Image (tube, rainbow, N blue to C red):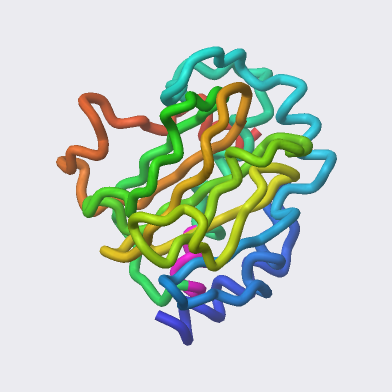
Amino acid sequence: MRGRAGDAARSMGARNMGHLNIGKLLASEVQTEPFSYVIVPGFLSPESVRAINATYPRIDKGGSFPIESLEDSMVIREVIAELDGPEFEAAIEDKFDVSLGGRPKMFSLRGHTRGKDGQIHTDSKDKIVTVLLYLNESWQQPGGRLRILRNGHDVDDFAAEVPPDNGTLLIFRRSDKSWHGHHPFEGQRRSLQMNWMTSEGSKGFHAIRHRISAAVKKVMAG
């Protein structure tokens, strides 16, 4: 996967996108213990984070917000369209040495964390790669900080901790030991999750797949 695909990713990452800093992703080192992951602080600029939050949908409940319901004026649509593009996919293939061409994608927008959220888990087996983009402008709370864990039973035995703010990007390749979780927090916590899935028929897609609508894709062409 490295080689031609990696060269293409580096070439595409050399140019600036509207919001995503592909070059910063390509320059970041993938950690391999306790599983493969990369953390990219400032993947979104402060200006992008502010613009996203200025038009972010009101989400007062836990769970995911359907991206089809996003209004045209919401800047997060532009971010989703860039994540759905070939430059980002090529960069992920390069960093994790994985082939993602033709794999379906699922997007999940969140704005509120419940006290029961953040329990230790690995993600379901129908997910190949998980992408988490954190959209809060600052995070002072002790809870709600995602931890890369060394096991499936102790949230305090962690290799890294990720504050969910300032456009930080976390990507990991799902495995049977990709344990992660966080201490409880209840309240506003904004994030965008993206997954490459094994198939459109996988149960992780829920009853209806979170598709990128034609209107969202037009953002990139506009």
Q: Is residue 34 visible?
A: yes
User: For residue 38: magenta?
Assistant: no
Q: Residue at point 42% right, 29% down?
A: 116
Above or below, 214 against 197 in this view is above
Residue 69, position as x, y percentages in the image: 48, 16
Q: Residue 119 appears at what percent x and percent y?
A: 39, 41
**Which is more toward the observer, 171 or 71?**
171
Q: Residue at x 37, y 63 (%)?
A: 151
Residue 89 position (above or below residue 77): below
Give the mark count.
0
Residue name at image x 43 percent, y 73 percent? 34
In the figure, residue 144 lies in which quadrant?
A: top right
Q: Residue 50 at x, y = what percent? A: 80, 32
- Horizontal side of 212 relative to 205 (left or right) equals right
The quarter in which the C terminus is drawn is top right
Viewer-proximal residue among 12 and 92: 92
> For the view shown, which residue lies furthest in the left direction?
201
On the question of residue 221 being in view, the answer is no
Q: Could you tell me which residue is drawn at 67 percent across and 51 percent down?
A: 168
> Does 90 appear in magenta?
yes
Percent across and percent down for residue 123 are: 32, 50
Which residues, given as a range, are shown in magenta?
A: 89-95
Location of residue 52 with respect to 154 vertically, above or below: above
Q: Is residue 7 above or below residue 61?
A: below
